[in-house]
C-alpha cells in the first residue's frame, strides 16, 4: 500500500488522479494539497469525490509529510512544486516525489536535479504510455534519418486554458531530437521572409491552443519525395493519471535519483 498526498488536487489533473487512486486498492490517499489562494469549499478529499474519505486538504505539505509515502505533484505552479520538493529533500524520512507539473525553467530544472540526490524523484512532462513510446520512436527515427536531408517540425495542440507553451512534452521531444541529430537551432513558430527557403539546420516548434483538446503531439520528418509523421493524441486525462499512479507505486523505496517515465515503464 502506498500512501499518497496529491498536490493540485482541485485541478483538472488532481481530480482525475484522486478518482483513479481512490479506486485503486494499492493506493491510499492521505491528503490533498492546494494553493492557499484557491477559493474552495472542500475540506476533505472525500468531499471532492463524493465518497466517505476523511483525507484532509491542506495548503502546507509539512502538516501531512509524516503520514505520506509519496507526493504526487500536479499543481500548475513550478514554485509550489519546487517548495514541496525542497521540504521532502530536507525531511529525514526521504519520501519520494512524482512531478507532473510542467514549465520549469533551466535554473529550476537544475535545482530539481540537485535535490534528487537526496530523494527519489520521477519527473515526466507526460506520463502516458503512448507518449513515452512516442519518445522512443522519435529517438529511433531521428537516429536513422540524421544527416539524410529530412526537415524536422514539431507540432502540439492543447486546450485553451493551458498556462505554458510549448508544452513540456514538446520540449522533451525537442531535447531528444537535438541530442540525436546534433541540431542546436530551435525556432518557435515562423513569421517573415525566407528567401533561401527553410534552413536545414533548425527544428521548428508550433504550439496550437484551443477548445478542450487534451493534448496532441506530432513530429514530422519531411524529405524530398516522402514524409514520416509520428503522432500521439490523448483522448482523456486518465492516461496521465494512470501513469502518475504507476509512478507513485514504482518510486516508493527506490534509491535517491532523478527518474522519468521511461524508467517507470521499462522503456529504456
Ligand atoms: P489546473 O490549472 O486545472 O490545476 C492546477 C491546480 O494546482 C489548481 O487547482 C491550483 O489551485 C493548484 N495549485 C496552485 N498553486 C498551488 C500550490 N501552491 N499548492 C498546491 N496546489 C496549487 O491544471 P491541470 O490541467 O490539472 O495541470 C496541472 C499541471 O500538470 C500543469 O503544469 C500541466 O501542464 C501538467 N500536466 C502534466 C501532465 C503529465 O502527464 N505530466 C499531464 C497533464 C497536465
Image (tube, rainbow, N blue to C red):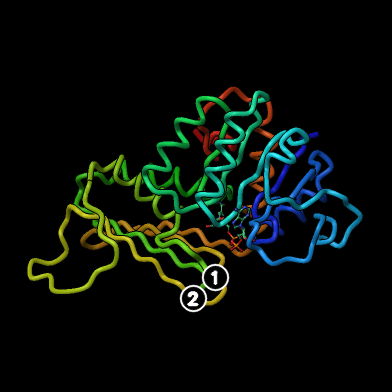
- Tag 1's secondary structure? loop
Q: Residue furthest right?
A: 52
Total marks in image: 2
Identify the residue at image location x=50%, y=25%. Answer: 117
Q: Is residue 36 left or right of residue 152?
A: right
Label 2 belongs to which residue?
A: 210
Where is residue 150 shown, x and y percent of the image? 24, 54
Where is residue 204 shown, x and y percent of the image? 28, 60
Label 1 belongs to which residue?
A: 213
Considering only vertical position in the picture, is 212 above or below 33? below
Is the residue under label 2 in contact with that under label 1 (CB below 8 Å)? yes
Considering only vertical position in the picture, is 195 above or below 4? below
Q: Which mark is residue 101?
A: none
Identify the residue at image location x=88%, y=51%. Answer: 53
Q: Is residue 14 left or right of residue 203?
A: right
Where is residue 188 shown, x and y percent of the image? 29, 62
- Tag 2's secondary structure? loop
Q: In which quadrant of the rendered view does residue 224 lie?
A: bottom left
Amino acid at each position: 500500500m502506498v500512501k499518497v498526498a496529491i498536490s493540485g488536487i482541485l485541478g483538472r489533473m488532481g481530480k482525475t488522479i484522486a478518482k483513479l487512486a481512490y479506486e485503486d486498492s494499492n493506493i491510499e490517499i492521505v491528503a490533498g494539497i492546494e494553493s492557499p489562494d484557491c477559493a474552495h469549499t472542500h475540506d476533505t478529499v472525500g468531499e471532492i469525490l463524493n465518497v466517505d474519505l476523511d483525507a484532509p486538504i491542506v495548503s502546507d505539505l509539512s502538516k501531512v509529510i509524516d503520514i505520506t509515502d509519496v507526493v504526487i505533484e500536479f499543481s500548475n505552479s513550478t514554485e509550489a512544486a519546487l517548495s514541496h520538493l525542497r521540504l521532502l529533500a530536507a525531511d529525514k524520512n526521504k519520501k519520494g516525489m512524482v512531478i507532473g507539473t510542467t514549465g520549469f525553467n533551466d535554473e529550476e530544472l537544475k535545482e530539481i536535479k540537485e535535490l534528487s540526490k537526496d530523494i527519489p524523484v520521477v519527473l515526466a512532462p507526460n506520463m502516458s504510455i503512448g507518449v513515452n513510446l512516442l519518445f522512443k520512436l522519435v529517438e529511433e527515427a531521428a537516429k536513422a534519418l540524421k544527416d539524410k536531408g529530412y526537415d524536422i517540425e514539431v507540432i502540439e495542440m492543447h486546450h485553451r486554458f493551458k498556462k505554458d507553451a510549448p508544452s513540456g512534452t514538446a520540449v522533451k521531444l525537442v531535447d531528444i531530437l537535438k541530442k540525436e541529430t546534433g541540431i542546436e537551432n530551435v525556432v518557435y513558430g515562423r513569421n517573415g521572409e525566407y528567401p533561401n527557403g527553410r534552413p536545414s539546420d533548425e527544428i521548428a516548434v508550433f504550439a496550437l491552443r484551443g477548445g478542450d483538446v487534451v493534448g496532441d503531439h506530432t513530429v514530422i520528418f519531411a524529405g524530398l519525395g516522402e514524409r514520416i509523421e509520428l503522432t500521439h493524441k490523448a483522448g482523456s486525462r486518465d492516461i496521465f493519471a494512470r501513469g502518475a499512479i504507476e509512478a507513485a507505486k514504482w518510486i516508493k523505496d527506490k534509491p535517491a535519483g532523478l527518474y522519468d517515465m521511461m524508467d517507470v515503464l521499462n522503456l529504456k
